[in-house]
Image (cartoon, rainbow, N blue to C red):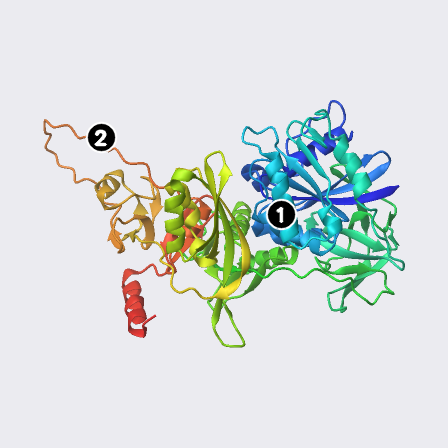
Amino acid sequence: MTLRNVAIIAHVDHGKTTLVDRLLQQSGVFRENQRVTERAMDSGDLERERGITILAKATSIVWKDVRINIVDTPGHADFGGEVERILNMVDGAIVLVDAAEGPLPQTKFVVSKALKIGLKPIVAINKVDRSDARPDVVAGEVFDLFAALDASEEQLDFPILYGSAKEGWMAPSLEGPKDSMTPLFDLVLKHVPPPTIEHGPFRMLGTILESNPYLGRIVTGRITSGSIKPNQAAKVLDRNGRIVESGRISKVLAFRGLERQPIDEAVAGDIVSVAGLPEATVAHTICAPEVSEPLPAQPIDPPTLSMTFRVNDSPLAGTEGDKVTGRMIRDRLLREAEGNVALRVSESDEKDSMEVAGRGELQLGILIETMRREGYELSVSRPKVLLQRDEANGELREPIEEVVIDVDEQFSGVVVQKMSERKAELIEMRPSGGGRTRLVFYAPTRGLIGYQGELLTDTRGTAIMNRLFHAYAPYKGEVQGRRTGVLISTDAGEAVAYALWNLEDRGPMMIEPGWKVYQGMIVGEHTRDNDLEVNVLKGKKLTNIRTTSKDEAVRLTPPMKMTLEKALAYIQDDELVEVTPKSIRLRKKILDPNERKKEERRRVAEGV
């Protein structure tokens, strides 16, 4: 059977997973009466809850006797490590662009990678049914983007389709026909070349890694040459050609619709999964025993943010989770780093802690959330930016991000002001249709930590921010952080409504009556810039004298709700986020107030 391998790439929320849904439905993968969930490719709980794709996944459909392997990729810049590797597996790409928003940073990032390795993309302009759609303008923007990324003349001569994945149609023009995805299927067969097959024994580059409780480690990739059968001898080579392990392939699985089925033989060009090699990972070459040269693997962009994951040592440790020891946390992080090439895990200088470096707050937040759901308890430090020192002149360099903010015109002033306070440079400002302005900045990653919440407050929830790593540039100096202090509990126990009511004029609370607190835990935000220790356990003094004035019922203002991402962005360097399966608490790194004062005096003396 002839083959086509194609990836669907786009910015987050432009409709990749919905498009795959429609392709699966219209190619006859599902039975007439089969119950199918929406966004079938987003199989993880977190993916379904947040409506984003986190892990790249493959599926396969048959159209006019040709098997098309389709890879659905994440659209968020934090998971770019997944996309960079996937492009090695495919021979063509469908670039999906929103008809209203146009090409955004992640589209630019992935398209540049795709053009660099010589893929000839198909452009699909999606969501043309939106009221603010401007498909013709967007088509021009896509052409300009390709030209700016040094596309070859062949790549610039790309075919365009217009349509709506939600309504289930794609067509060569806006007029239609608006009845099916057939034009897209036919274009893939015509425009995407069949996979290039090299001569020689079996070789395959590992691209996606997952573990299965029954089969162990499963590595997915495209077979470059030769063929593979179950029980065949194989060895694993790393990037430099060193042998990692030798063994036997226990199972060969191929994608058939959404299912993976065992097959007797897989041939060059097909995308398959193999099981039975416990050491093989991403970027390793799985090959026949006689092969000595590894396949070239794409270099992965370096991480820009790091966090310290520590053992939870608060007084409430171990009361809500069952995986609490340093060894368990360390093993889990090392397991994660094996499959996620964009993460770097190393031992930290501090006792019982690990340093985890990644692409951004969202990627690290997703990792913490996943661990939390698995029953882990841990405490996490504030995200730190990874700086580099220039070898030539010894100056410090920091990561700079390209930030694109779409905002209503009346709020553009406050956004420019806040971004300039965070040491950002305004590069471009232009109308983006519908009374909105598009602002493009180059901003240091340090300045963007915690800005998302502030941006939504300043713009009444109307702004959309997208960001992408741009380059390392000279250090920009100090960036002002949080301007307020915090309220810290002086004692351990359960918070009392009367005490919280009395403290309301000191600042908004983060806890509710009845919540367990301990000494050194952060219970609210102070209205001033210094920290204040407060007693949230103080009940009302009761007397045996009854008075005519009735006791007024205590009415409390609802507390600030701290989500994981919000908490990570909120804390300062001397604070931690305590994460357990049931709660997220904020605390000071040093719980004892006297020890805290000593540490503060020491830092002042050293001038830190």
Crowd tier of the residue under label 2, counting other residues whose Cα lies within 10 Å: few below 14, some 14–19, many 20 or above: few
Which of 546/428 is in front?
428
Residue 12 x %, y %:
58, 42
Element at label 2: loop
| Quarter assignment of residue 34 | top right
Which of 461/273 is in front?
461
Residue 68 x %, y %:
79, 40
Report which residue position mark 1 lands on: 144
Give the left or right position of residue 360, taking residue 561 as reference.
right
Give the left or right position of residue 482, taking residue 530 as reference.
right
Residue 207 x %, y %:
72, 53
Give the left or right position of residue 433, taking residue 36 as reference.
left
Separation of disc 2 and disc 1 at Cα?
64 Å
Which of 133/251 is in front?
133
Quick check: can you spot residue 459? no
Give the left or right position of residue 487, taking residue 101 as reference.
left
Residue type at mark 2?
A: Ala
Residue type at mark 1?
A: Asp
Report which residue position mark 2 lands on: 553
What residue lies at 78% left-to-right and 54% top-to-bottom? Answer: 276
Crowd tier of the residue under label 1, counting other residues whose Cα lies within 10 Å: few below 14, some 14–19, many 20 or above: few
Looking at the image, which residue sits at the far top? 33
Quick check: can you spot residue 347? yes
